[in-house]
Image: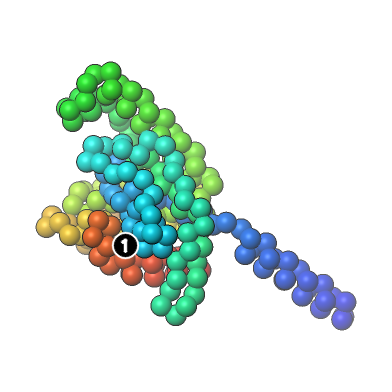
């Protein structure tokens, strides 16, 4: 009996060691221009004092997976949470180079952007299999009942990945958090402004609740 107790204790210790060594991958997902990179920058500024990547008003500014390793955040009661932050390209069901031309790009540049953006979408979906937790970043001024959002949610549900939904851009008058909550009642929805850092404390609390 004593031997069994010792074995159980050793197994428990080993599980905890491997659990602590495991690097949690936290992925930021969502449609283009929802504010993923803005949120990623805000997180990195808050806890690392540096930016994650560039932002733009033109869709698909982030066209490659970006990773910031070992981001550690702290709760009000002194707890710590470490993760690798993964900023993904915006997911879209249709990418047309003519949309980039309308945004002011020349045809050659627009076609290159469309090609890179398409690859970025494919990479984002592939990376879902590596995610431990996903934060979906939505523009709260836009209709949440889009094909892209439903596709993303469906993929996450199929993989049984913990999800936190962020209704971003609450600093804008057209922001409608309740509409986002009504669209996805099965998940917690937190309204923030990644640009101005509004409600980031609630966002971090949400991460602790989701991951711990």
Q: State the residue at coordinates (49%, 38%).
A: 126
| Observer-nearest of 185 and 34 | 34
Residue that protrudes farthest toward the top in the picture = 108
10 displayed left or right of 168:
right
Q: State the residue at coordinates (20%, 49%).
A: 142
The quadrant holding residue 17 is bottom right
Residue 67: percent from the left, percent from the top? 47, 47
Q: State the residue at coordinates (31%, 66%).
A: 200
Residue 149 appears in the figure? yes
164 displayed left or right of 195:
right
Is 41 situated above or below 127?
below
Is 89 situated above or below 203?
above
Is 10 situated above or below 62?
below
| Observer-nearest of 153 and 15 | 15
Residue 172: percent from the left, percent from the top? 15, 56
Residue 104: percent from the left, percent from the top? 17, 28
| Observer-nearest of 109 and 190 | 109
The quadrant holding residue 1 is bottom right
Label 1, on which residue? 189
Residue that protrudes farthest toward the left in the picture = 173
Q: State the residue at coordinates (42%, 37%).
A: 64
Residue 8: percent from the left, percent from the top? 78, 73
User: Which structural element holds mark 1?
Assistant: strand
Residue 136 appears in the figure? no
Marker count (numbered) = 1
10 Å neighbourhood of mark 1: few (<14), some, or many (≥20)? many
């Amino acid at each position: 009996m004593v031997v069994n107790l010792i074995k159980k204790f050793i197994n428990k210790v080993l599980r905890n060691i491997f659990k602590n060594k495991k690097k949690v991958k936290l992925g930021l997902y969502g449609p283009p221009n929802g504010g993923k990179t803005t949120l990623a920058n805000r997180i990195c500024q808050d806890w690392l004092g540096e930016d994650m990547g560039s932002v733009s008003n033109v869709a698909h500014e982030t066209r490659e997976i970006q990773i910031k390793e070992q981001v550690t955040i702290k709760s009000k009661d002194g707890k710590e949470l470490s993760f690798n932050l993964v900023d993904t390209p915006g997911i879209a069901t249709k990418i047309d180079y003519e949309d980039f031309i309308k945004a002011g790009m020349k045809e050659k540049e627009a076609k290159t952007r469309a090609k890179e953006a398409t690859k970025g979408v494919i990479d984002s979906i592939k990376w879902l299999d590596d995610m431990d937790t996903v934060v979906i970043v939505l523009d709260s001024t836009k209709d949440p009942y889009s094909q892209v959002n439903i596709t993303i949610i469906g993929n996450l549900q199929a993989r049984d990945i913990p999800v936190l939904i962020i209704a971003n851009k609450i600093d804008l008058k057209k922001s409608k958090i309740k509409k986002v909550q009504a669209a996805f009642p099965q998940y917690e929805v937190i309204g923030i402004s990644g640009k101005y850092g509004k409600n980031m404390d609630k966002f971090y609390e949400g991460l602790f609740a989701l991951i711990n």
